[in-house]
Image: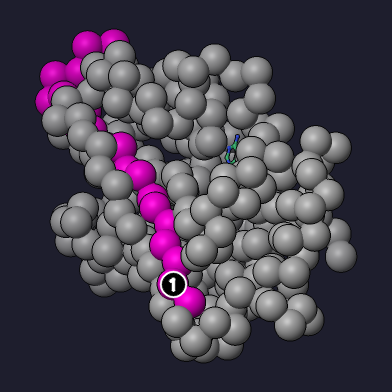
Amino acid sequence: MTDIQRIIQRLLETNPLREPVLRSIIQTLNLPLASLGLDVGSGIGLQALLLAEAAGTEGHITGLDISPELLTYAETLVAKAGLSDRISFREGDMHGLPFANDTFDWVWSADCVGYPAGELCPILAELARIVKPGGSITILGWTSQQLLPGHPLLEARLNSDCSSYTPFLRGKSPELHFLRGLHWFREVGLEQVRAQTFVGDVQGPLNNSQRTALTSLFEMLWEQPQPQVLDEDWQAYQRLCHPQSADFVLNLPDYYAFFTYTVFSGKKPQEQTR
Ligand SMILES: C[S@@+](CC[C@H](N)C(=O)[O-])C[C@H]1O[C@@H](n2cnc3c(N)ncnc32)[C@H](O)[C@@H]1O
């Protein structure tokens, strides 16, 4: 399996977990009907479909992504949903968006802009350039999880020793962490800036798609063993997180887990000073 195929598989597998909470977040945005929206880092188009629903039949969503392979998949997905007239895709880099000033009514980006850490200021300035005065900018990212009920210390160590986030966070200055987003929204002159965290959860008995989603998530988060991981933690991980194990945690009839998405949003002033 190529890296791109693996990314597509993970996005599809974990979608049943993410979709309900992302849907709730979209509802709170009150996107204007018939509006023009941009989804930055649109991946395989899963959220473009939800955003198109929210913007109504007269609205239009543009999905932008740097990966041509993901865009091709997204176009097929959207065509299958019969929404190709309301959602289009464009290849591009969020650091230099291929759109004129004041093009969109709103911008959305999930698990891409500034996530899990990065230089948010120039990207937000770029988003503010292409959004119309009064338009909104919303960026969100997966910020935490508790997936191994009863094993909080093991889970904390797995997060610290095996986390797939480590390479993106190690050595980064605290100011560049995603949760410092409020500062950067204000820094680029956005108004009505706010942060809010939403919770997604799941409880046993799990259906098949929830089991697949959580198994995929375990692998995504912790499957890459790092040199510093303790042998006993690695064995405990395999015992609890592998479907073939007799102690597979998802077999608990009363399994319960949750995760959070944190959303930063702001509006471009009516009279933007550039
Ligand atoms: C974790 S995926 C999230 C995809 C989608 N937003 C979702 O939540 O399902 C991150 C996406 O950002 C895209 N991406 C990464 N760097 C980018 C850049 N510089 N410009 C545009 N897209 C980028 C990747 O190709 C990928 O599709």
Residue visible at 76% across and 78% down? 245
Residue 40, compared with residue 243, is above or below; it is: above
Q: Nearer the viewer, residue 86 or 93?
A: 93
| Residue 236 in picture, x, y percent from top left | 73, 61
Residue pictured at 21% horizontal, 34% vertical: 194
The answer to whether 126 appears left or right of 230 in the picture is left
Categorize mark 1 by other alpha carbons within 10 Å: few (<14), some (14-19), many (20+): some
Residue 166 placed where, x, y %? 67, 35
In percent of the image, x 68 and y 69: which residue is there? 240
Q: Position of residue 205 (x, y in %)?
A: 47, 88
Q: Which of the 4 quarters of the picture holds residue 10?
A: bottom right
Depth check, front residue: 188 or 77: 188
Q: Please tell me whether residue 147 belongs to the stretch shown in magenta.
A: no
Residue on which the image places disc 1: 256
Task: Tell me where the magenta segment starts and ends, as one range.
Answer: 255-274
User: Which is nearer the eye, 241 or 47?
Assistant: 241
Task: Judge whether 121 appears above or below 161 on screen.
Answer: above
Residue 264 shown in magenta: yes
Q: Secondary structure at mark 1?
A: strand
Taking the image as drawn, is residue 1 in sight? yes
Q: Quadrant of the C terminus?
A: top left
The x, y position of residue 267, in whole percent, is 20, 32
Image quadrant containing the N terminus:
bottom right
